[in-house]
Image (tube, grey):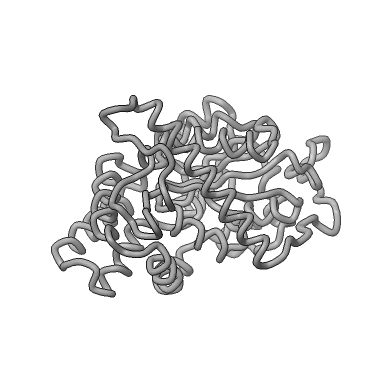
Amino acid sequence: MAALGWLTPRRRSATARSVLAGEAAAEAARKSSLDAEQSAGTEDGTAPGALSAAEEGEPEFPVVGDDRAAAFFDLDNTVMQGAAIFHFGRGLYKRKFFERRELTRFAWQQAWFRLAGVEDPEHMQDARDSALSIVKGHRVSELMSIGEEIYDEYMADRIWPGTRALAQAHLDAGQKVWLVTAAPVETATIIARRLGLTGALGTVAESVDGVYTGRLVGEPLHGPAKAEAVRALAAAEGLDLARCAAYSDSHNDIPMLSLVGHPYAINPDTKLRKHARARDWRLRDYRTGRKAAKVGIPAAAGVGAPAGGTAAAVALHRRRR
């Protein structure tokens, strides 16, 4: 995607770069969503019937027909096991985009991510720098086509069914659902489309005449930049953030989670779990049965959960921890 007003990090503060990255991500997300609607035709996603509240006296959530509400889902370790950028790297190596030593670095970063269960900014930055150097000079259309294949090879069977069910509950209520990730926006858009979601906010790489330059628009969509992207998209879409929901596993996404009226910690790292409990945010953990039991996950929202909205709606109403 062509960059608009791209500036180097030396000429912008971290905050300004976050805003730039967020606005670029929101613009890209809206464009891809509109393109998809025009190609496939706009569907009526309103649920056929109201979702029942799980606890007597508690208001229904998501609220059916509330078009000023939406849901924002982090991708890595929230919707999908592992990091999308690493899976994408494996697919590019298979297609001989780079050498074995670079694959070894990708493999180490992925192993660390899986063991730690959290994002390390330095590791993630290194992975993105590697990816930018690898795709430089390639056409955007080429990487999009390859991304479709890589999704089938490495990502499709790593989607958390429980989180997928939560997203479906919002869709069944007639709300838009967006992925929000530091992964390239093209990769994120493919994943969102395959899952039947509205679209994706992701890191925007600069391209000129459809060819990647090896630079970013602003900075990676990480931490505060995610919050700026959600804020920009909400303004463009006419959303009321107090009625929106956000889901993430990482304390790095606390700025995004704090923006909305319904924040959820999914497979949370230690810092996010502590923060969520202190603020009475809801917790969900789909990693193991033992961890799920600790945070009171209802069986209907676990690994065996159906994709329908009813099971997810029940999960959303269970007690807070």
Count of numbered badges drawn on the protein: 0
Q: Residue furthest right?
A: 49
User: Which one is nearer the viewer's eye here, 305 or 247?
Assistant: 247
Q: Position of residue 246 (x, y in %)?
A: 58, 40
Q: Position of residue 15 (x, y in %)?
A: 39, 26
**Residue 163: in sight, yes or no?**
no
Name the residue rendered at 79%, 37% in the picture: 59
Q: Residue furthest front?
A: 209
Q: Quadrant of residue 105?
A: bottom left
Name the residue rendered at 73%, 61% in the picture: 42
User: Which one is nearer the viewer's eye here, 283 or 223?
Assistant: 223
Name the residue rendered at 83%, 35% in the picture: 57
**Residue 94: in sight, yes or no?**
yes
Q: Residue furthest left?
A: 101
Q: Quadrant of residue 318?
A: top right
Quarter holding the C terminus?
top right
User: Which one is nearer the viewer's eye here, 150 or 219?
Assistant: 219
Q: Up-down: is 239 above or below 207?
A: above
Q: Position of residue 244 (x, y in %)?
A: 66, 37
Q: Up-down: is 68 above or below 181?
A: above
Q: Position of residue 142 (x, y in %)?
A: 38, 69
